[in-house]
Every structure is written in structure tokens, then in C-alpha cells.
Image (cartoon, rainbow, N blue to C red):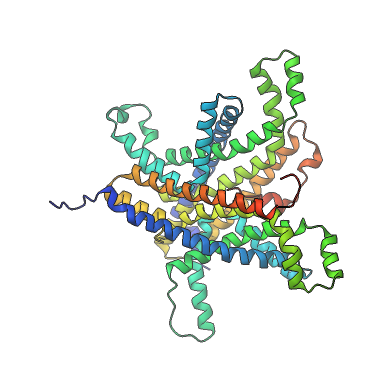
Amino acid sequence: MDFTWLTNTFYLGYLWEGFVNTMLLVAISGSLGLALAVLLALGRIAGKRPLQLLIRGFTTTIRGTPLLVQLFFFYDGVGRVLTQFPGVRDTFMWPVLREAFFYGALAFTISVGAYASEVIRGAMLSVPSGELEAARAFGMSRFKIIWRIWLPHAIQICLPTLTGELILLLKSVPLVSTIAVMDLLKAANIVRDETFLVYEPLLLIAGIYIALTLILTFGMRIVEHNFPGVRPAASRRGVLALLTGTRRA
Amino acid sequence: MQSYGQEGVLDWAGPLLQGALVTLEIGLSAYVIGLLLGLVGATAKLSGWRPLRATATAYTTLVRAIPELLLIILLYYAGTQALNALLHEFGVKGSVEISGFVAAVGVLAFVQGAYMTEVIRGAIVAIPRGHIEAADAYGMSRPLRFRRIVLPEMLPNALPGLNNLWLILVKDTALVSVVGFQELFFTAQQAAASTRSYFVFYTAAGALYLLMTLASNALFTRAERHVRRGQPGT
């Protein structure tokens, strides 16, 4: 095991940049993805029939194809088509649109949106209908019912599952190294190419990922504990079970 | 007239389907091996011997906490070297080339096995204790008890998880394209690069994956109905 390359500031710079980009991707795609998920779930439950079918087709497609393929679809497919449009290069969006990072964030946001929307939809359907009827009896508007009663209770129900989704998002970030985004894996690959070390850089970022998973898990556990209305017993689970969570197809 | 580099999009239909077949092959092989690993892992986790239990826990925890792509790259290189080192220990001279197929299947199965362990362990734990004791009281041997009692009682609990894992595996096979193994997505990337029709080929690859996941979902639903026959309320 040779870790002397860690004293090289160039390599440390790569690793830091990779770490920052990884965190940025999780933060951006996590928050936008959850927002998208809520919209999709609402559309699936309360939308008109054609909208429901559309959303169902969308989530089935996203959940039924590899994320790697989606990433290349957006980056190589949509990205290239977009740059061929005449005016695109002149718009204010161009500095964003030419970055691979943008397509990574886009693909992850859509993926999180599709997976989490099924989770949130299930939770919304399991909110007791009496609560919604009571809200209606109070004369709340439709929007207010959703905002004040339905969503908060639904999210409270599925919060541990959403934590799992967030960890899965973190674990899929290395995929962006294939579309030339500087994430931790990309940084490790650069070090590997330049130092001819096969494992050490990979083992280091494996360690970083384990640490990040742990931190994220504990952070979310604090959120779960302090979420309004959560019974303490509901979120008291083993650390190992929380760390790894369950995977979904 | 033949012009260089102007391959038609349709010329790639054959290779793409061939790639889909390879994807199914590595998927199925990794699934079967993963299933066996899962059975071994679950037995280890449920065993009374502490070191065995700890090893199995370390295996499932580590594999599930490290990103799949990272794990696949690590095992792909490390696995080959470790095998060669092992063979040297036993006095075999020279080095073996592991074929891409074996490496891809091995790596995917190793990852899959960790998740399988959890699914199978959970399904076995859900069997009422009394049923196992009753089997013992009848003097059933362990293999007979497994075949007649544990397996049929475990399957309805395990099948949704097994379905889930198969879908994950089909999608994870795309990851071995990163280490240069020629399966469906690798072929699609080649096709896209050589014809410059990126949009078409990534959509086609996506459609083929979707076809596989939807078809296997239907099969698993039928299988679940079969193993749940005789159970109330399904």
C-alpha cells in the first residue's frame, strides 16, 4: 500500500474538487428531485386521467432503465441535439448547458424524482382519509389541505425511505465520472493514471464514501427524530440497518 | 458508392440485439451465483458461530455502503490480481487471463450476493419458529426440512425482494461497460460514436432494457401468484 501521493497538492486538489462536486450533485439533485417527486406524486393521485398515464409511463421508463444509460442519453443525446440549435450558444443558459455537470444533475434529479414519487405516492395514499375530511370540514382550500395536512403527514410516514433514496443518490454519483465530471471517482482515476497505482486511490475513495454514508445517515436520523409528530419509537433503528438501508429496483 | 464512416443506423440492429443477449447471459449467470452466495450468506448470518456471523455482516455492510461502480472497478482489477496471487501460492506458474465474461459475472454476483443475503435472511426469519420445530419433531433431516418446510415457506416472503434484485441486476449490468466489457450498453455506445446518432442508440438501448425489466416483472408476478397459491387474501 502506497499512499505517499497524498502529499502531492495537485492530487489533493483533484480530490477536493471531486468531493465538492459530489456534495453539490447530492444537494442539488436531492432537493430538486424531491420537489419533482412531490409534483409527480400529486399528478398521479389528483391529476386527470391522461396526466396520470403520462406520469406512470415516465416513472416506469426511468425506473426500468439503467441510470448510466439515462446519463448518456441526456449528455450525449440531448446535449448534442441542443448545441445544434442555432440560438442556444447565445443564450444566457449556454455556460450552464455546455457543462457535463449540468447533465449529471439533470439525470440524477429526474431519477430521484421518479423513484421518490412512488414512495411519496404510497405514503400519501396511506394518510387516513379522516384527516383529509376533517380539513375539508374546516373549509380549507384544496391547496391548503395538501400543504398543511396531506404532504406533511405523508412525508412523516415515508421519511426513513426517503433517507434511503438520498443514500442511493450519493452512491450513484460516481457514474458521472463516465461523462467527464470531476467527482471523487474521476479524481481517483486521474491519480491512478498518473501514479500507476491500481487500488490505493480507489480504496481511499471507498473509505470516503463509507464515511459520507455514515454522516448522511446520522444527519438524516437527527432530521427524522426532530420531524414534527414523529413518535420516537418509529425512528429508533439500528445504525447498521440505517447505514445500508434497502435498495429498490 | 461506399463512403467511409457512413454506416447506416440499421446495420447496428444485429450487434445491438447480440449485446442484449450478452446482457441477459451475464445477468442470469450473476443472478444464479448471487442466489447461491445469498443462501450461504444467510445461513452464515443465522448461524450460531460468531466469527461466521461477523464475516457475513462485514460482507453485506461493506458491499452495500460502497457505490456499485466503484466496487465493480475495484473488484475487476483486484479480483484478477488476487486470483493470480492465489495461484502463485499454490505453485502455478505464469498468470491466468480471466475472460471478460467471467470477471463481469463474478463481480456482479459478488455485489448481488450481499443484497441476496439480506433478502433471504429476512424471508427465513419470517417463518414461524414452531414450523421448524415441528419439522424437527417429525425427525426430518436438515436437507429434507429445507426442501419441504423452509423453502416453500420462505419463497412467498422472498420473491418480491428477489424480483427487486433481478431488476437492479439487469440495470447494474450496464456498469460493466465502464470496464470495457462488450454488452448491450457498450455496443450502443460504439454504435452511437461510429454513426454519430447518439440520440437514436441511447434510446434504443434504453428501450431494450425497459423491455427486459417489464417482461421479467410480468414473469415474477406470475411466479409470486404461484408460490402464494393457497394463501388467503391474495
From where the camera sits, is residue B178 visible? Answer: no
Work out which residue is located at the far bottom of the displayed protein and give it: B91
Give left or right: position of B178 versus B52: left
At horizontal 66% and vertical 54% (from top left) the residue drawn is B226
| Residue situated in front as seen by the camera: A249 or B61 | A249
A165 or B33: nearer the eye? B33
Foreground residue, B47 or A170? Answer: B47
Q: Position of residue A125 (x, y in %)?
A: 68, 32
Q: In percent of the image, x 72 and y 58: which residue is there?
A: B154
Asked if A105 appears above or below A50 in the picture, the reply is below
Q: Looking at the image, which residue is at 38% across and 46% down?
A: B204
Q: Position of residue A17 (x, y in %)?
A: 47, 46
- Is residue B174 visible in this depiction of the protein? yes
From the viewer's perspective, is A142 left or right of A14?
right
Left/right of residue B190 with respect to residue A22 in the rendered view:
left
Vertically, is B38 above or below A98? below
Q: Residue at x 43, y 53 (%)?
A: A10
